Amino acid sequence: MNSTRSARVATFIDKGGTGKTTTAAHLGVALSRQGNDVLMIDLAGKQGDLSKHFGVWETVERWIAEDDDWPNISTVFQDEWDIIVDKLGDSAVDDLIVETEEGPDLVPAHPGLDSLDAELGNIDNPDERYSRLDGFLDEYIEPLGYDVVLVDLPGITNNVTYNGLWATRSVIAPAEMGVFEASQLQALEKDLHRMEDNFDVEVELAMVVPNKVDRRTKLADEYLEKYESAYPERVGEPVPVSQDIRNAADSGHTVFAFEEPSSTAERAIRSYEANAEQLNTKLQPNPRFKAEAASDD
Ligand SMILES: Nc1ncnc2c1ncn2[C@@H]1O[C@H](COP(=O)(O)OP(=O)(O)OP(=O)(O)O)[C@@H](O)[C@H]1O
Ligand SMILES: [Mg+2]
């Protein structure tokens, strides 16, 4: 795929529980099954939802309990990171990354992310405060040659979230069907414009993924139509509400890993596959690097 730079995208909307983590996990697996090398980064906090999706959270918790949790994702934001790399060499980055059984690699969340928001708040210069993750990805992750870096963000706008947006410049917003969700999407667009105005950083809303959709209800159709007209070309295939999505997460995998998926799980799989394909055409080449690549020639 993209030979010079990885495509980057974050799952985000300023609302809890709409399916950010579920979407990240399933799109990560779908992109990987379509032949991409995928790295997922969990910035969504200490409960390790993304790691739970891939059955690796227990391992991470054991590392934490055994004091074997250093370095970790929160460390890369800190001033000491360069010193850590000097000391540990390549293994500093290798230590952050866990392989999953479903294809993507994963940088798990860590409890240190919780205090990180306040720590970042102490940095006066916004360029410095918000670009930490970007700098880390450029210097340490790009050389690893991933096709796609997928960042799962928390459902709140804080300094960690801004780092995720700054680094990826591209957002997938999972939205449920309802008034509140629709206004949340508008708030998201405002947020992204604000970043552009204040910091000259252009963050694109790459895809709205209608989630937990029950096509039998009128409400679903109504909102799907609304989303289509508000975000033309950017609304993904709706993902059905499926108990199997919950069950899969509870058993530490995605719906792709079911040997005999139910019919709703199968529909979910097809939606995620279609969305991954759509994303693939959108995300490459990474618009942010087009100019750079051209000037390299
Ligand atoms: N399509 C779906 N069908 C059924 N359940 C779903 C679906 N998508 C997500 N869920 C469930 O909804 C809950 C919230 O999903 P998820 O954790 O992905 O949301 P989130 O936006 O990441 O939440 P948070 O803001 O807490 O990070 C989970 O229990 C998840 O299993
Ligand atoms: Mg989440």
Image (tube, helix red, strand yellow):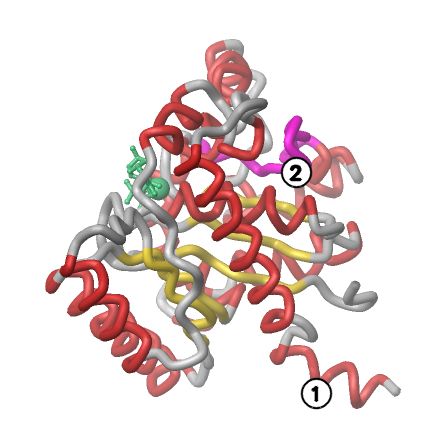
- The Cα atoms of the two marked residues, 2 and 1, are separated by 29 Å
Neighbours of disc 1 within 10 Å: few (<14), some (14-19), many (20+) = few
Main SS category, magenta section? loop
Q: Is residue 193 above or below residue 148?
A: below
Query: Magenta residues?
Result: 95-110
Residue at the image point whose x is 49% and y is 15% from the top: 58
Q: Which of these two is toward me, 280 or 297?
A: 280
Residue 103 located within the stretch drawn in magenta: yes
Q: Which of these two is toward me, 183 or 112?
A: 183
Residue at the image point whose x is 40% and y is 39% from the top: 113
Residue 157 appears in the figure? no
Q: Secondary structure at mark 1?
A: helix
Residue at the image point whose x is 84% and y is 84% from the top: 296
Q: Are marks 2 and 1 in contact (CB under 8 Å)?
A: no
Q: Find residue 24 and report its horizontal and vertical position in percent.
A: 48, 47
Residue carrying label 1:
291
Q: Secondary structure at mark 2?
A: strand
Q: Earlier in the sequence, mark 2 or mark 1?
A: 2
Q: Which of these two is toward me, 132 or 5?
A: 5
Neighbours of disc 2 within 10 Å: few (<14), some (14-19), many (20+) = many
Please state if 219 lies on the left or on the right of 145 as rendered. Answer: left
Residue 225 located within the stretch drawn in magenta: no
Query: Could you say which disc has been placed on residue 105 in the image?
Result: 2
Q: Find residue 245 and report its horizontal and vertical position in percent.
A: 39, 33
Q: Nearer the observer, disc 2 or disc 1? A: 2
Label 1 near ligand 2 (CB < 8 Å) = no
Label 2 near ligand 2 (CB < 8 Å) = no
